[in-house]
Image: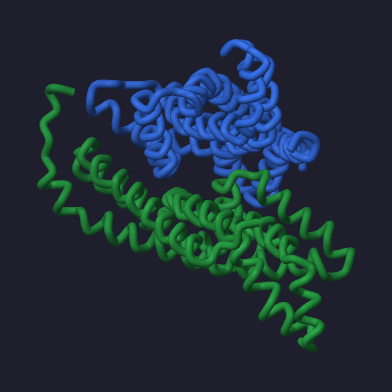
Chain colours: A blue, B green
């Protein structure tokens, strides 16, 4: 028990790295994914085609392979990223593909009658977007988005395989030193659970309320 | 990029590792999905028709597994459990067990939604023609629920196939492991990825395509 308490600060350090990676990935994916998702929903074919190709490509490959590709593969073409940056780039590439899909889905599930009605009362393109489409899309966007935040926190554990000391790797290191495996894995699981469960519950509540 | 000299010959010599790996990945996915479907179906039925006290237990299982990284569960089963109890199993068994438990937690929800969406009238019609509850389940509820759940099942199956890549973390020689192995042997990094990535892509979309065809044939619009 005493050893377990001693290891806690170390695990908390790892947890902070997990949260940092997840937060960066979510923020960057929103910046990349939201505009591209809007283009995929409303844009002309020549703009939609490359985005669709990108999203379908990324979603057909495991995250782990993307991580390896960015960290081990890109240096071969002289693009050498430090591990933390490589991890964030790879996870962002994956997450933004999901955000693109969620954004597109949120807009496309709004009945066309809404746009037609907005046009009929003479709203401009900008007003249609800000007063009619966007408010409805946000409600459809939020539940799957919060779910995908949970997936990000879970997926961030893969960065441990690149040698980044997140919660997962700090667990492995502590177990390597103390040889107390099962209790530590369970503590780690509870730490992940403590972050993700409230988010999952929030996602369900949002879904009940909005959809 | 301009200065990179491609040398596929040396990677091609080891390509067998990739195809063996792909085959093992497919086997891991198939075994885990089969066991996961059994877990999901049984637990969905229990939480719908079973005793009330079973419901929070099933919810606890679903919530725990769904909110913890798969990699941690893989380590927990492979390193954690044998360290505490006297149990011996190899990496493949350990991974299949983990992925089954993991997929079960997702499939419970899918199957429960499917079972709940079976129209009451169908079940009542089954009763009316004198089927026993077991026969109603087998001939009416399950086939209808499966057909309703098909679209959600397809997505889960594809993501489970991709999740088999995590088995490489405990040195199961599946596709991602073979990929890394060739890379460290030959240092032909770009060539390995140019070969392995399409294998994943083509397989994922082949699975999706097959399931979409099944959907077109069997699916019931809700």
Seen in the picture, residue A163 relative to A33 is either above or below; the reply is: below
Quarter where residue A132 is shown: top right
Measuring from the top left, give residue B152's x and y in whole percent.
58, 54
Q: Would residue B90 be seen by someone viewing this image from the given angle? A: no
Q: Is B83 placed left or right of B115 in the picture?
A: left
The x and y percentages for residue A119 are 61, 18
Taking the image as shown, residue B181 lies to the left or right of residue A128, namely: left
Looking at the picture, does residue B148 appear above or below residue A48? below
Residue at x 27% of width, y 58% of height: B19
Height in image: A146 above or below B57?
A: above
> Along the horizontal axis of the image, is B62 left or right of B96?
right
Q: Residue at x 66, y 64 (%)?
A: B40
Q: Quadrant of the N terminus of chain B?
A: top left
**A7 or B68, nearer to the observer:** B68
> Quadrant location of residue B122?
bottom right
**Could you say which quadrant of the image residue B114 lies in?**
bottom right
For image coordinates 57% across by 33% down, the residue present is A108
Residue B9 visible to an observer of this rendering: yes
Across and down, in percent, residue B79 comes to 56, 54
Residue A210 location (% of width, % of height) = 76, 34
Q: Is residue A23 above or below residue B113?
A: above
Nearest the viewer among A31 and A91 is A31
């Amino acid at each position: 028990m005493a050893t377990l308490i001693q290891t806690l600060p170390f695990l908390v350090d790892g947890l902070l790295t997990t949260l940092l990676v997840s937060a960066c990935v979510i923020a960057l994916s929103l910046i990349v994914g939201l505009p591209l998702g809007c283009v995929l929903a409303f844009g002309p074919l020549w703009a939609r085609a490359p985005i669709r190709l990108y999203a379908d490509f990324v979603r057909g490959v495991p995250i782990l392979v993307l991580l390896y590709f960015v960290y081990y593969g890109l240096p071969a073409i002289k693009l050498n990223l430090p591990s933390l940056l490589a991890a964030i780039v790879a996870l962002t590439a994956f997450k933004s593909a999901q955000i693109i899909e969620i954004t597109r889905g949120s807009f496309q599930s709004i009945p066309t009658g809404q746009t037609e009605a907005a046009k009929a009362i003479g709203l401009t393109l900008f007003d249609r977007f800000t007063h009619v489409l966007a408010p409805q899309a946000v409600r459809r966007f939020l539940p799957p988005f919060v779910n995908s935040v949970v997936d990000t926190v879970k997926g961030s554990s893969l960065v441990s395989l690149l040698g980044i000391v997140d919660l997962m790797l700090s667990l492995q290191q502590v177990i390597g030193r103390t040889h107390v495996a099962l209790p530590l894995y369970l503590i780690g699981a509870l730490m992940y659970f403590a972050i993700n469960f409230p988010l999952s519950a929030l996602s369900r509540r949002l879904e009940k309320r909005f959809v | 990029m301009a200065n990179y000299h491609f040398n596929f010959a040396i990677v091609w010599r080891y390509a067998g590792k990739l195809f063996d790996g792909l085959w093992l990945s497919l086997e891991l996915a198939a075994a885990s999905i089969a066991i996961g479907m059994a877990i999901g179906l049984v637990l969905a039925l229990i939480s719908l028709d079973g005793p009330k006290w079973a419901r929070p237990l099933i919810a606890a299982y679903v919530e725990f597994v769904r909110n913890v990284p798969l990699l941690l569960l893989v380590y927990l089963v492979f390193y954690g459990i044998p360290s505490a109890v006297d149990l011996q199993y190899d990496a493949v068994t350990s991974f299949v067990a983990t992925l089954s438990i993991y997929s079960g937690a997702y499939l419970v929800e899918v199957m429960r939604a499917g079972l709940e969406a079976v129209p009451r009238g169908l079940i009542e019609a089954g009763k009316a023609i004198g089927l026993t509850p077991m026969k109603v389940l087998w001939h009416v509820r399950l086939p209808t629920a499966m057909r309703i759940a098909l679209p959600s099942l397809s997505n889960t199956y594809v993501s489970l196939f991709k999740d088999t890549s995590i088995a490489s973390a405990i040195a199961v020689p599946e596709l991602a492991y073979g990929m890394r192995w060739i890379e460290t042997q030959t240092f032909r990094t770009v060539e390995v990825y140019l070969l392995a990535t399409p294998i994943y892509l083509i397989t994922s979309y082949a699975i999706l395509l097959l399931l979409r065809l099944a959907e077109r044939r069997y699916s019931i619009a809700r």
